[in-house]
Image (cartoon, rainbow, N blue to C red):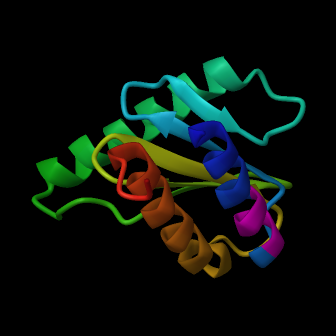
Amino acid sequence: MKEEAYKKILSDLEAEANVEGSCIVSRDGILIYSSLKDVYAEAFAAMLATLLSSAEVAMDELKAGVPKKVIVDGKNRKIVVIGAGSHALLASITEGNADEIYEAMIKAAKKIDEVLSGKND
């Protein structure tokens, strides 16, 4: 079952890196899976998809290629958003250094893409 695979991927990410919670979102903003607490995940998912899409358009305008990550740096937390294949994105919340969780997020994103594309069956 895909939900169990997503749960394990996010659980492993949270265990490996300084991540409070994460969510997997389709590129069109539909929530696929979330481990976030105290967040209206469906609305948050739509905002995350818009955030990444806007960054991609802005980078394209500059002819600078696809962004590797988008970081929103707040007072107490950071949101890090990366692509997880062509159909999804992965967003994580951290109080730590966003660059330090990036490598762990890349591994998780590859696993998410495999689940979505059926390569892990």
Figure quadrant of residue 20: bottom right
Task: Determine whether 110 is above or below 51 in the image.
Answer: below
Q: Position of residue 109 (x, y in %)?
A: 48, 61
Q: Position of residue 14 (x, y in %)?
A: 78, 64
Rendered location of residue 5, percent (x, y):
62, 50
Q: What residue is shown at x 33% (from left), y 38% (from top)?
A: 53
Residue stretch in magenta: 11-15
Work out whether residue 84 can be spotted: no
In this orientation, does residue 88 appear? yes
Relative to 64, 47 lies left or right:
right
Residue at the extreme left of the image, as rendered: 63
Which residue is found at the position 43% from the left and 65% from the top?
Answer: 110
Identify which residue, 87 or 98, lies in the foreground: 87
Residue at point 65% right, 70% down? 98
Residue 9 highlighted magenta (yes or no): no
Is 36 rendered above or below residue 44? below
Dividing the picture into quadrants, the one containing residue 27 is top left
Number of numbered tags placed on the structure image: 0
Q: Left or right: where does residue 32 sit relative to residue 75?
A: left
Q: State which quarter of the image contains the N terminus.
A: top right
Rendering coords of residue 63 (x, y %): 10, 59
Is residue 12 on the magenta stretch?
yes
- In this image, 119 relative to 96: left or right? left
For the residue pair 106 and 8, the one nearer the viewer reads as 8
Chief secondary structure of the magenta portion: helix
Vertical position of residue 28 compared to residue 119: above or below: above
Q: Residue furthest front?
A: 121
User: Residue placed at 69% from the left, 45% from the top?
Assistant: 4
In this rendering, position of residue 76 left or right of residue 5: right
